[in-house]
Amino acid sequence: MGLRTWLRNRVLGRPKAAFEAAKTTRLTTDFFKPLTSADASLIGDLAALRNGARALARDNAHAREIKRTYRVNVIGHRGIQLQPQIKTASGGDLDERRNRMVLEEWQRWCRANSCDVSGRHSFHGFELQIPGAWCESGEIFFRFVRRQFGGSRVPLALEVIEADRLDEHATGPSDRPGHKWRMGIEHDQWGRPTRYKFLVNHPGDYELGGRPSNALHEIVDAADVVHCYGIPERVGQTRFEPLLTPAIVQAQALREYQKAHLTRKRVQANQLGWIQTPEGLDGDDVIDHRRVVDSEAGQWFRLNPGEVPVAPNLGPEDTSYEEVVKDNLRTQAVGVGVNYSTLSGDFSEGSYASLRISVFENRDYWRMLHTSIIEQFHQRVFEEWMNAAVLFGALPSPTFDSYWSNPDRYNYPHWQARSWGLLDTSKDIAAFEKARELQLETHADQVNNYTGEGFRRTIDQIASENDYKRQRGLLTPLDDPLQQQ
């Protein structure tokens, strides 16, 4: 301590906290505020958080609904669809021929037999794994395996790796100068991942009785690993906690409360009362030192002399049960980023306006996750796939010979995430028309947001349907506005 600091503390005393939240009083002494980095906070608790989140997702109905909601809103039933945007050499219109060839080859590769080393998951199946893993594990990994599987013409496939296999305790110096290991990931001096240290076996596989491999770790180059983790909460975060984390304590407390409440109701329904008797207890109807009398609905029994009936006293009724459950579920919903109505299945409260605001705000959150998953997973996989597809002739020469001289021309597709229907069709359609009239939105943006299919694909499908209807003599003015004139 310097002389100036010593004198200031001696004469003036230590400076008091300027913020109320920074003060420690007798009412806030149990508010633990440690000074830790993001990784230091996680390293000792990460496995417990994952196990707790998975236990909830297995047994807790509301936790299962959270996981289902993430999958529905981040991925949806069609998935995030590739729309190649290769332009002609002049840089003007889209090169429809090349775009069609890329899309057809990509769709062929996306089958489970081709894109998954195990042959179990299609590309859409991989997509659905990601938000589910975010909820239970906080992150998920994919490894590029550069060889052909099944009927694929592209020597590339993916191996999905659960977060437990990346050893978060592998922290320390690296055998390469300027690098260091941090929670299973090796970084260079700038913090860029360079290698990953995976456990050969899942740490929980011991229950299957399998014999572990002699090799504890398998080190994989970062160029062969895709790390999907959603949206980081802190700067410098290496590993990521489950999205269910804020709900774990609340969900378990609610489960125990509901269990106690239902148990009490069962006791009330099944335990009619007691009989006091002056004699001792003996005979076959004595269980745990109590005389038990079986009864059925609508029956009364005559008591022996000296026996007195006693009604059970289970205490006052729990009149706040419904409010306690609602408050708990609201807290869970806020913590995990879903609507209370969706989580609880209760749509009885709230006005149409408030529900609409909540829905639209929530959709912005889902769009943030769309962007995150596209940047981390879809775009990364597509670029690796394009390299392999062109290099090994799945996208043939000479059509794609220009790829190596200008890969950016090919590697900037549009990824169309899922969309949502209109809340109030008549009003929303009128708003669409007004927005286009005032040039506040494009027709393409409106089609993309409404259908989730992409503007060109939708317009092409409409034109194709109209041609077919015209051939069959079924084209109506509704199909062709020119007929209305």
Image (spheres, grey):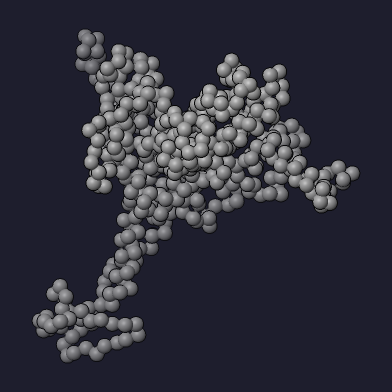
Task: Give the total number of marks visible in the rendering.
Answer: 0
Residue ID at (65%, 43%): 451
Relative placement, left or right, of 348 versus 5 is right
Quadrant where the C terminus sits is top right
Where in the figure is residue 220, as x and y percent of width and height? 35, 26
Find the residue positioned furthest to the right. 485
Answer whether residue 16 is visible to the viewer in this image: no
* Residue 167 position (above or below residue 113): above
**Which one is nearer the viewer's eye here, 126 or 189?**
126
Where in the figure is residue 439, as x and y percent of width and height? 74, 32
Relative placement, left or right, of 260 versus 389 is left
Quadrant where the N terminus sits is top left
Residue ID at (71%, 45%): 429
Where in the figure is residue 388, as x and y percent of width and height? 51, 26
Q: Determine the image quadrant of residue 312.
A: bottom left
Relative placement, left or right, of 386 versus 240 is right
Find the residue positioned furthest to the top. 3
Residue ID at (42%, 59%): 322
Answer whether residue 171 is visible to the viewer in this image: yes
Q: Determine the image quadrant of residue 8.
A: top left
Where in the figure is residue 28, as x and y percent of width and height? 29, 37
Residue ID at (60%, 44%): 420
Relative placement, left or right, of 460 versus 181 is right
**Which one is nearer the viewer's eye here, 177 or 279?**
177
**Which one is nearer the viewer's eye here, 24 or 37?**
37
**Which one is nearer the viewer's eye here, 420 or 246?**
420
